[in-house]
Image (cartoon, rainbow, N blue to C red):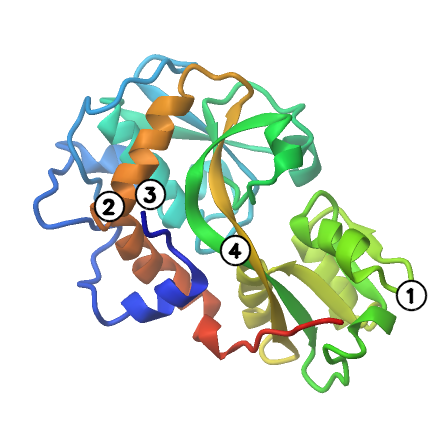
């Protein structure tokens, strides 16, 4: 099954008819689209079965803000985005009437202490360690690690190890820096994506290592002060998070597979991710750090 990668996002732009959260031409739509914000849901109702926290509602854990993925600053303002519309599609295919978001701090969510949700969508990379805490669907987006610096920075693949690096607690970037890069200076660990890029902009650190998607989105907001100068290729991807041993895991996994095979994921990527990144992700060179 072909999964969505950063390369696929760029390749599908222009090849797809862009409609807000549109899907394949033969997909059916909900009779009450307003229940799912600006999303045009796809697929057949009741094609999967879910047992949810609330009747007729899919409760989704998120970590806001997360532009492009869930567009809004609070649960009641999110009406669109790749992951939000993906949740709407899953709810629609389960015959549910609406999606309700629950916002958590990243460290609370990724630690497994958050509760009261059916699924989590927060650009979470699937790892073996996280599988000890959560259930995951198959991947719906392939992820890499981006290196962000000031625009005029001298940091390169050869000097990254000796640079002062900022990472996000619990992020795959933090694990890669500690276990693979092993920098000569202790990495600065922050609690939010906003904090690590504030530190970079202020000159407190030389580089940020985090998901390429997070890096591109955050850098775009700095008006050219920062840049994503390189990325590290990883054979990893984002998956839908479910509480450990959830009885919904198989059904959600099936839904993700269907969203991939019927073209919905490609359309969501074209609608929401490419505009959010601001650049072709393929233009970011891959670094090999020795």
Of mark 4 and mark 3, the one earlier in the sequence is 3
Comes first in the chain, label 1 or label 2: 1
Q: Which residue is mark 3?
A: 85
Q: Gap in Å between the C-alphas at discs 1 and 2? A: 45 Å
View extreme (left): residue: 26
Which residue is labeled 1 in the image?
A: 184
Disc 4 is placed on an element classified as: strand
Q: CA distance from mark 3 to mark 2?
A: 16 Å
Q: Along the horizontal axis of the image, is 67 left or right of 200?
A: left
**Which secondary structure, mark 1?**
loop
Label 2: few (<14), some (14–19) or many (≥20) C-alpha neighbours in 10 Å: some
Front: mark 3 or 2: 2
Nearest the viewer among 85 and 254 is 254
Q: Rate crowding at label 3 as few (under 14), some (14 to 19) or many (20 or more) other CA atoms within 10 Å.
A: many
Name the residue at 81% across, 51% down.
189
Nearest to viewer (mark 4 / mark 3): 4
- The reply to whether dot 2 and dot 4 touch (C-beta < 8 Å) is no
Residue name at image x 87 percent, y 72 percent: 162
In the displayed image of the protein, which residue is found farthest to the front?
A: 290
**Residue corresponding to mark 4:** 143
Element under disc 3: helix
Relative to residue 131, is residue 225 depicted above or below?
Answer: below
Asked if residue 183 lies left or right of residue 89, the reply is: right
Measured Cα–Cα span from mark 2 to mark 4: 19 Å
* Rendered image quadrant of residue 235: bottom right
Of callouts 2 and 4, which one flags the residue occurring earlier in the amino acid sequence? Answer: 4
Residue marked by disc 2: 261
Gap in angstroms between the C-alphas marked 1 and 3? 42 Å
């Amino acid at each position: 099954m072909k999964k969505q990668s950063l390369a696929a996002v760029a390749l599908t732009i222009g090849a797809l008819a862009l409609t807000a959260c549109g899907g394949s031409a033969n997909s059916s739509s909900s009779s009450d689209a307003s229940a799912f914000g600006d999303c045009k849901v796809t697929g057949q109702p009741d094609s999967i079965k879910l047992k949810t926290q609330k009747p007729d509602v899919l409760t989704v854990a998120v970590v806001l803000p997360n532009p492009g993925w869930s567009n809004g600053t609070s649960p009641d303002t999110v009406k669109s985005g790749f992951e939000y519309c993906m949740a709407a599609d899953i709810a629609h295919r389960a015959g549910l009437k609406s999606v309700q978001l629950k916002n958590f701090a990243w460290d609370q969510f990724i630690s497994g202490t958050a509760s009261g949700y059916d699924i989590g969508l927060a650009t979470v990379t699937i790892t073996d360690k996280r599988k000890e805490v959560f259930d995951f669907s198959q991947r719906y987006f392939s992820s890499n690690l981006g290196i962000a610096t000031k625009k005029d920075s001298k940091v390169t693949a050869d000097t990254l190890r000796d640079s002062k690096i900022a990472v996000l607690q619990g992020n795959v970037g933090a694990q890669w820096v500690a276990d693979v890069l092993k920098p000569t200076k202790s990495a600065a660990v922050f609690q939010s994506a906003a904090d690590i890029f504030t530190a970079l902009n202020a000159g407190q650190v030389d580089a940020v290592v985090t998901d390429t998607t997070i890096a591109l989105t955050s850098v775009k907001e700095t008006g050219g002060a920062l840049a994503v100068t390189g990325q590290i290729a990883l054979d990893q991807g984002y998956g839908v998070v479910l509480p450990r041993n959830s009885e919904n895991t198989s059904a959600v996994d099936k839904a993700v597979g269907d969203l991939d095979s019927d073209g919905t994921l490609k359309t969501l990527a074209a609608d929401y991710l490419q505009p959010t990144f601001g650049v072709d992700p393929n233009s970011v060179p891959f670094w090999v750090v020795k």
